Image: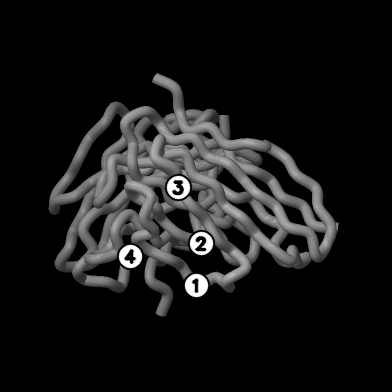
Amino acid sequence: KAGVTQTPRYLIKTRGQQVTLSCSPISGHRSVSWYQQTPGQGLQFLFEYFSETQRNKGNFPGRFSGRQFSNSRSEMNVSTLELGDSALYLCASSLGGYMPQHFGDGTRLSIL
Amino acid sequence: QKEVEQNSGPLSVPEGAIASLNCTYSDRGSQSFFWYRQYSGKSPELIMSIYSNGDKEDGRFTAQLNKASQYVSLLIRDSQPSDSATYLCAVNGPGSGSRLTFGEGTQLTVNP
C-alpha cells in the first residue's frame, strides 16, 4: 500500500513569492492534516481537511491556506513568503477522528 | 504550561538497556495518544498508538497510559543503536478532529 506522497521534496523561494505544496494521502484516507516543523517551534498544526472541508485550523496567518479535492489529495498554499516560513512542511493522512496519522516525507521549504 | 511536555533530553542508554520516555498533557479530555519516531532529516514515523488506560505492547515497545495522572510513556526494551532518534509524543484532544498537539521531543541515543 503506497504511503503519503508529498511533492516537491525541496523548494527554494525568495521573499514575497508564493508556493503551493501537494499531498496525496494513503488510499482510503479522507483526512489530510498539514504541519509545520521548525527547530524553534517544533511541530505545529496548520489545518485539517476532511471530505473537501476544512475541519480545523491552527494559529497561523491567513497567508497559509489549503484545499482538498474530491480524490482526497490536498494542496497547501503560502503567499507573500517570509524568511520565517522556512521549514519542513509535513502532510499526514488518516481515516479521520482519533485514528493514527501517517506522515509523508515532507517538503523542505527554504526562503532566501 | 505547555499542552504536551516530554522529559528533557537528550537521553543516553547503553545497548540492550531499557529506554524510558515520558510525556504529560494538560487537556484532561484528550482521547488518543501517539508516539512517533523521527530520525534526523526524516519525517515522523508512527510507532505506537494508545487510547485506554493501561499498557499496550508491540514488539520491543510498550506504551503506558494513565489518564488520571495525564501521563503517557514509552518503554523501549533491548534498546538498539538503530533506536537512536527523536521520539515525539502526540495527543489528540476532544473536539479537535484530527489535530495533533506534539511535545518538543526527546532525543534518544543508544550507545553500542
Q: For the residues marked 2 and 3, what is the alpha-carbon distance in whole angstroms?
A: 20 Å
> What's the amino acid at mark 1?
Asn
Quadrant of the snapshot with the N terminus of chain B: bottom left
Say which amino acid is labelled 2. Answer: Gln
Q: Residue at x 67, y 37 (%)?
A: A8
Q: Which residue is mark 3?
A: A68
Q: Residue tagged by mark 2?
A: A44
Instruction: Identify which residue, B81 or B57, lies in the foreground.
Output: B57
- The chain to which mark 1 is attached is A
Chain ID, mark 2: A
Which label's residue is closer to the chain start, 1 or 3?
Answer: 1
* Snapshot colouring: one colour
Q: Secondary structure at mark 4?
A: strand
Q: Which residue is mark 4?
A: B24
Q: Residues within 10 Å of mark 4 (few under 14, many from 20)?
A: many
Nearer mark to the viewer, of 1 and 3: 3
Same-subunit check for callouts 1 and 2: yes
